[in-house]
Amino acid sequence: MLPIVAIGLVAAHGAVASLHSNNLAYLSPSRRHPTLAVPASHLAIRAADELYTPDELEFTHGVASGDPLADSVIIWTRLAPSLNNTASDTVPEGVVPIYDHPEADQPSEKSACVEFRIASDEKLTDIVDKGTAYTTSDVDYTIKFEAAGLKSFTTYYYQFNVCNSAKTSIVGRTKTVPSKDAKVEKNIKLAVYSCSNYPEGYFNAYGNPVSKDSVDYVLHLGDYIYEYKGDSSIRNPEPDRETYDLYDYRKRIATYRTDQDLLASHQKFPWIPVWDDHEVADNSWREGSVDSDGEVFAKRKQAAVRAYFEWMPIRQVEMDDSLRIWRSFSLGTLADLMMLDTRQYSRDLTVLGGFAGIGGNSAEVEKLVNLDNRTIMGFNQEAWFYDQLSQSSNRGAAWRLVGQQVVFSHMTFGFFTTEGFNRDQWDGYLANRRRVFSHLYDNQINNTIIMSGDSHASWVSDLAWVTGDEGDRPYDKNTGDGAIGVELAGSAVSSTSPIGNVLPNLLTNLASAWLVNKNDELQWQDLYFRGYYEMDIGYDSLTATFFGIPDVKTRNTKEDIIATFVVINGENKLARNPTVGGGTAKSGSLKNGKVST
Ligand SMILES: *[C@@H]1O[C@H](CO)[C@@H](O)[C@H](O)[C@H]1NC(C)=O
Ligand SMILES: *[C@@H]1O[C@H](CO)[C@@H](O)[C@H](O)[C@H]1NC(C)=O
Ligand SMILES: *[C@@H]1O[C@H](CO)[C@@H](O)[C@H](O)[C@H]1NC(C)=O
């Protein structure tokens, strides 16, 4: 019955209703799933609303852009009726909030009208596209447009304004990607991040590429926010509790988006993010997390996903495939970029407590890790991923870049066994990893670079099938012969080191040396520094530069190059020049190399 009512109202207010529909935030992320978007019927009712005046409105959280294609890009802003609060508790019909939100902006019947312009010059005179849309409390006053008709691999500037008014947002900068069949004339540069924990420190890692103006695009591999209640002497996010419902997740992201360096990165670079666990809850998998399951987890995930899509400048992919965020980008003939979801989409049960079979559910997980039907990403996504790798190789793109959440390579402490120590990583999903390796080796797919986050430490490995289970292939840890690619796993923006941020570099380097010694394919490891890495990608070779951020307790610009790696096209391993990493690193431990702090 609802659709008929909706059609009637849309007809009555056709032109106006489309001004709401122009705002992609109302799809957050899918109108076909009633709890995940604003129902069309509700929008039609909104169409009769009155508008806020320009005086009542503010652009509260800067601007952002993301998911660039060759001819379009998503641009984002938030235009809200008050500066003193930043989240709306308007929730979909039938969804009951878990908490009362007396502090929230009250649901309002009014709409805010916003226009955008995108131009090839910074003064915004040479306008290429423009548009108008409404936003309301239903989507926390967020606004997402797809700016279209753009030229490939070109820099653009964009700005929003309140309709028919001189009240404007700041100007954002963005960039399209090269068109799929084009030879890319300049190297492409990326900054790769994961694990930005607001109470644990300032996001200095985001700010440095802004001041250096050193990259084209930003990748984020997840843990963009954390759901925990803040308990820090540095700074604490709102709300002052663990996040469970829509208001909570909106407010949490809104707090993160007050970090000046994060705002600057969003303003200057197009982002291509995926989520990990903490965008929803700790160690989440398909049906639960460490501290939630069943109906509570299902509602929590709906709320988290909806807020994420409202606030992030990304596209909705295939909306019938519930919660799908995995997607790919072609960067000319230089590379294909595949962004996976090994966390929320369809991951089988993970470790929710305990370690190595002792405590929590870890004994139960130990029994599952080697099942043939076990998957970290769901069989739909697996099929898509293998197909993407093959298509990319068949079309002759020079590189396959795979952005995903958790460390892929086998990692053991090697104390009593060679078992993997972290079953929440690919070491807990052995058959899925075997299927990835066998797809790469059997089809001779070359030049694959897996990029990983989640671990708050750096792990650089030859991608080698020396997993200690089935199917291992010959591999020489000194020459790298036998590998099929490279894994670059980066440290955290600010989340604490797995060994606590308390040990001096000298001691963490000893722990790194132990790990590098026990794991053949692991060529460099560091536990000390927060940071990120930049990739400089050309046809002949690719360089990854790892930056260490020494201090996140204050906002500052300190950073140091702690290791650099080259991968030569066709070699499928880290370049030895003369040994991996050029033979020296400034922290951690480098196989066959020196570390001088
Ligand atoms: C926001 O500001 C208005 C006007 O100053 C005030 O009436 C209102 O109580 C404030 N809201 C919150 C949540 O502080
Ligand atoms: C996976 O395989 C195991 C062992 O054969 C079986 O018990 C289990 O039901 C299977 N799981 C699924 C989801 O098919
Ligand atoms: C990968 O490299 C190997 C060794 O150079 C080559 O034999 C093979 O054909 C390459 N694979 C593809 C798909 O081009």
Image (cartoon, grey):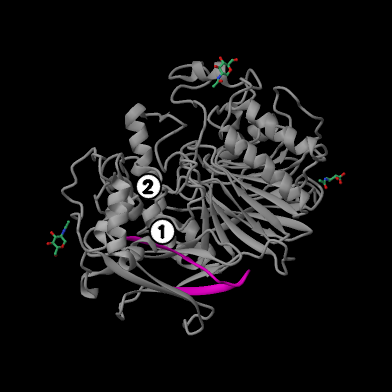
Q: Residue at x 27, y 69 (%)?
A: 58
Which of these two is toward me, 70 or 260? 70
Q: Secondary structure at mark 2?
A: helix
Q: Residue at x 31, y 59 (%)?
A: 10
Q: Where is mark 1, residue-wise?
A: 24
Quadrant of ligand 3: it is top right
Q: Quick check: is the Cβ at mark 2 less than 8 Å away from ligand 1? A: no
- Where is residue 341? Give x, y as percent: 54, 41
Q: Does label 1 or label 2 sit earlier along the sequence? A: 1
Q: Quick check: is the Cβ at mark 1 less than 8 Å away from ligand 1? A: no
Which of these two is toward me, 472 or 75? 75
- Amino acid type, callout 1: Leu
Measure the C-alpha gap from mark 1 to mark 2: 12 Å
The local crowd at label 2, few if under 14, some if 14 to 19, many if 20 or more residues have their Cα within 10 Å, is: many
Say if the magenta span includes residue 144.
yes
Answer above or below: position of 518 versus 201.
above
Answer above or below: position of 180 versus 201.
below
Q: Where is mark 2, residue-wise?
A: 306
Task: Evaluate whether residue 167 shows in this view.
Answer: yes
User: Bounds of the magenta span?
Assistant: 142-158
CB-based contact (under 8 Å), mark 1 and mark 2: no
The local crowd at label 1, few if under 14, some if 14 to 19, many if 20 or more residues have their Cα within 10 Å, is: many
Observer-side mark, 1 or 2, equals 1
Check residue 576 in the rendering and tell me which mark sits there, or answer none: none
**Residue 527 picture quarter:** top right
- Where is residue 90? Give x, y as percent: 24, 50
Say if the magenta span includes residue 259.
no
Task: Evaluate whether residue 557 shows in this view.
Answer: no
Count of marks, rendered view: 2
Residue 123 placement, left or right of 58: right
Which quadrant, please, contains the N terminus?
top left
